[in-house]
Amino acid sequence: MSWIPPTHELLSPITADDGSQIEQLPLKPLYYAAQKDALARVGDDEDDQFFELAKLATGLSVKELDQLKRPDYVSIAQYVHEMSTRPASHFLESVDGAAADPDQVQLLQPLDVAGRSLTALTLEMPVLRATKAMKKLKTAKERAEFITAHCTGLMIPDLDRLTVPDWNQLQVRIDDFLNKPADFFRSATSK
């Protein structure tokens, strides 16, 4: 069973740009590239960031979003916050139960790569050569994308189509690969 984004029932209906009434909002997952672009457009103001991400999560126009009553907006902002900060496992636990092998990452949404639809990614520990190359890159974002592509076997453009929770899930495990000693992995697999 796969994860299905929630629908938010509005406390107060709003008027769509086409004049129809909107009473519920089917929320959408946030995708890595779209979130990255949205945050780059608005800068560092947290309110502007949440508003821009709320547009992505709801599909509403600025005019439609501006009509929301504050409690509805707070609910959407909470969803955006969870989508932006939680790993995919947070959303999948309610669907699939217990977590499995941390190196076999179940994706929140399927990822189309080279004509195949992937529902999971198998992570490989990075070789030292890759971490040396990663450290030569200029920005933290470039380094994260490079090492994520290396550990997943994906191309960097493929990463853009990951949901943000999938990206977050990968970063947790890749951080383990980069910073934990060998004994950490021995004890994790011997349980």
Image: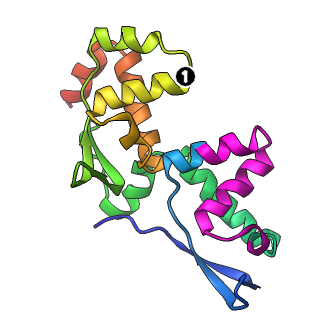
Residue that carries the numbered disc 1 in the rendered image = 140
| Dominant SS in magenta | helix
Secondary element type, mark 1: helix
Relative to 27, is 173 above or below?
above
Q: Position of residue 76 (x, y in %)?
A: 66, 64
Judge whether residue 174 can be spotted in this image. no
Residue drawn at point x = 26 percent, y = 14 percent:
127
Residue drawn at point x = 65 percent, y = 55 percent:
53
Q: Nearer the viewer, residue 1 or 19?
A: 19
Q: Is residue 183 left or right of residue 14?
A: left
Judge whether residue 98 can be spotted in this image. yes
Q: Is residue 149 left or right of residue 68?
A: left
The residue at the far bottom in this view is 20
The residue at the far left in this view is 190
Quadrant placement of the N terminus = bottom left
Quadrant placement of the C terminus = top left
- Find residue 26 and report its image quarter: bottom right
- Find residue 94 and report its image quarter: bottom left
Q: Nearer the viewer, residue 126 or 19?
A: 19
Figure disc tally: 1
Q: Position of residue 52 (x, y in %)?
A: 70, 55
Q: Nearer the viewer, residue 190 or 61?
A: 61
Q: Is residue 3 left or right of residue 10?
A: left
Relative to 75, is 40 above or below?
above
Magenta residues, start to end: 37-64
Q: Amino acid at mark 1?
A: Ala
Is residue 58 found inside the magenta-colored segment of the image?
A: yes
Q: Position of residue 176 (x, y in %)?
A: 38, 23
Q: Position of residue 119 (x, y in %)?
A: 26, 54
Is residue 70 found inside the magenta-colored segment of the image?
A: no
